Amino acid sequence: MFKDDPVRPENYQRFERDVPQWFTDAKLGIFVHWGPYSVPAWAEPIGELGTIEKQFWFKHNPYAEWYFNTIRIEDSPAAQHQRDAFGGAPYDDFIDQWDPNEFDPAEFIALVKSTGAGYFVPTTKHHDGVTLWDAPGTDGRNTVARGPKRDLVGAFEKATRDAGLRFGVYYSGGLDWHFSNLAPITDDGQEFGRPVDAAYAEYAYKHVDDLLDRYSPDILWGDIEWPDAGKPAGPFSMENLFDKFYSQTPDGVANDRWGETHWDIRTSEYQNGLSVEGDGGWENCRGIGFSFGHNKLEDETHLLSGPDAVKTFVDIVSRGGNLLLNVGLTASGTVPELQRRTLEHLAAWNAVNGDAVFGSTTLDASLAAPSAADTEPWLRWTRTDDTANAFVDTTGKVSLTGVSDAVLADTARLADGTPIAAERSGDVVTVTLPAPAVTGPTLVRFDLKA
C-alpha cells in the first residue's frame, strides 16, 4: 500500500493485499509490444515520455505502436509517411502483411531469461484493437484468422512457462480505436477520448475473461483505464475478473491501469508519473528506445546502451522498484540488433553482479547514501541480508561519502569475493576499483555491523 493511495471503491476493497514476495524479489521483467504496427515500424524519435510538451506529443508521437492514431491526424508527419510509403492505405492492411516467419518463441524467451528477468509480459491487445489470440467477438480481426495465422499469446505463454518464468498479459482496456471508432487523440487540448459505454465494457470483459481461462496469467497488466460502465458491480464488472484472477492465482499481481478499481502495484513510464515511485510496490516501464513498438527510425542515439540499461535497472532497484524493460520485436519476429545488444550486455552484467540486485532490499540512507543527481561518482546501494552493496560507476581511487560506521569498511570486497583495501575517514570510505569485467557500475560489498 502507498501512503497517498486513494480509497478504493467499496466493491474492490476486498482485493487489497501485500505485494507477493516473488514479484518484489524479481526486480526485472521483460515487456514486448508486437502488432500490425510492427510492419510500418515508424515514429518520430523525439524523446522520452515525460520530457516532451503535451501540446507536441501526439502529432509527433515517438510510440510506433500508436501509428494507427498518429496517421489519422491529418497534418502529422506520420500521416504524410503513410501516404508516401503506403499510398494512404488503411491501417488494417498491415494485419495481413504481418508475417512473423522468423519468430522462435523458445529462442526469444531464452534471451529474456538470460537477463535474469523473473517475468515476461507481452501485449495481447494494444489500442489498435487487434488481438494476438482468437479473442471472442473480434470477427476475425486477430492473429489466428489473419496475418500470422497463429495464437501468439499461446506461443509466448508456453515458452515462458517452459523456461520457468512468470507470465503476464498486457491488455488495453482503456482504448480500442477499431471498436469505438472515436476521433484520433490529438495535441489540441481536447479531452482524452476513450470508450466508456456498456457495449465496450462487455467486449473488453469477455476478452480478459478469455485470457484468464486460456493462459492463467500471473500478472494482469492493464493500460490507460477500464470502461466506466464496467467498474460498478454487475455481470460484466472488472470486480468479477479480479475475483477470477485471484482465485486462479492467489499470488497474482495487478497493475494500476484498470481505472479506479483495484491494483497491487503502481506504475510509472519513462519519466512520466514518477510520483508513484515511493512506498509500496512499484514498477517503471520503458522501451530500450523511445518507442515500445519497433521503430526503424531509432538508432544508437535513441536507445539505452547496455551500460545505461544497467544503471537504469540498478537505480530503480535501489529505490525499491522493479524495471519492466520493453523489446519491440520486428514484424518477422526477431529482436532488433541494437536492442539485442543491450539485453545481452544487461545479461552479462547481471551474471556477475546479480546476487546483489535480485532479491535485494533497499538500504536505509542513514546507513549509506546514494550520490545526488549529476554528481560523481554515480553511487547506488542495495542490501542483501547483512551485506551492504555499493554500485560505483567509476574506476581507480574513489571516495564514497555518506557511509556510516555501521558499514564495515575493512570487509570491502568485489563481486567475486576478492578483498580490496578500504580506508575510512569519518563518513567517507576510500577504495581503489579495478576496471569491471563487464562495463557498468562496479560492485563493492561490505558487511553491516550486527
Image (cartoon, rainbow, N blue to C red):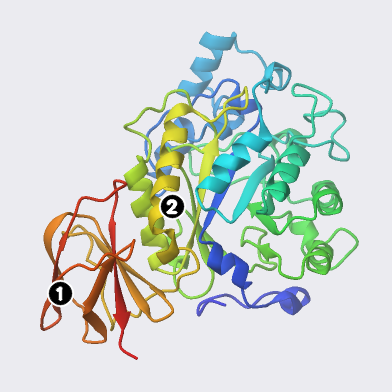
Does residue 356 appear anywhere in the picture?
yes
Residue plotted at (62% across, 27% down): 333
Marked residue nearer the N-terminal end (2 or 1): 2
Up the image or down, 383 lies above or below 28; here it is below
Q: Pointer 1: what residue?
A: 429
| Quadrant housing residue 23 | bottom right
| Quadrant housing residue 365 | bottom left
State the SS at label 1.
strand
Up the image or down, 69 lies above or below 245; here it is above
Q: Residues within 10 Å of mark 1 (few under 14, many from 20)?
A: many
Give the residue at the far bottom of this rendering: 450
Q: Pointer 2: what residue?
A: 351
Looking at the picture, which amino acid does disc 1 mark? Val
Residue 130: x and y, percent? 73, 33
Residue 229: x and y, percent? 79, 57
Q: What number of labels is visible?
A: 2
State the SS at label 2.
helix
Q: Nearer the viewer, mark 2 or mark 1?
A: 2
Residue plotted at (78% across, 68% down): 246
Residue 46: x and y, percent? 37, 34
Task: Work out whether residue 423 or residue 33 is closer to the camera in this orientation and state it.
Answer: 423
Task: Work out whether residue 417 or residue 333 is closer to the camera in this orientation and state it.
Answer: 417
Looking at the picture, which amino acid does disc 2 mark? Ala
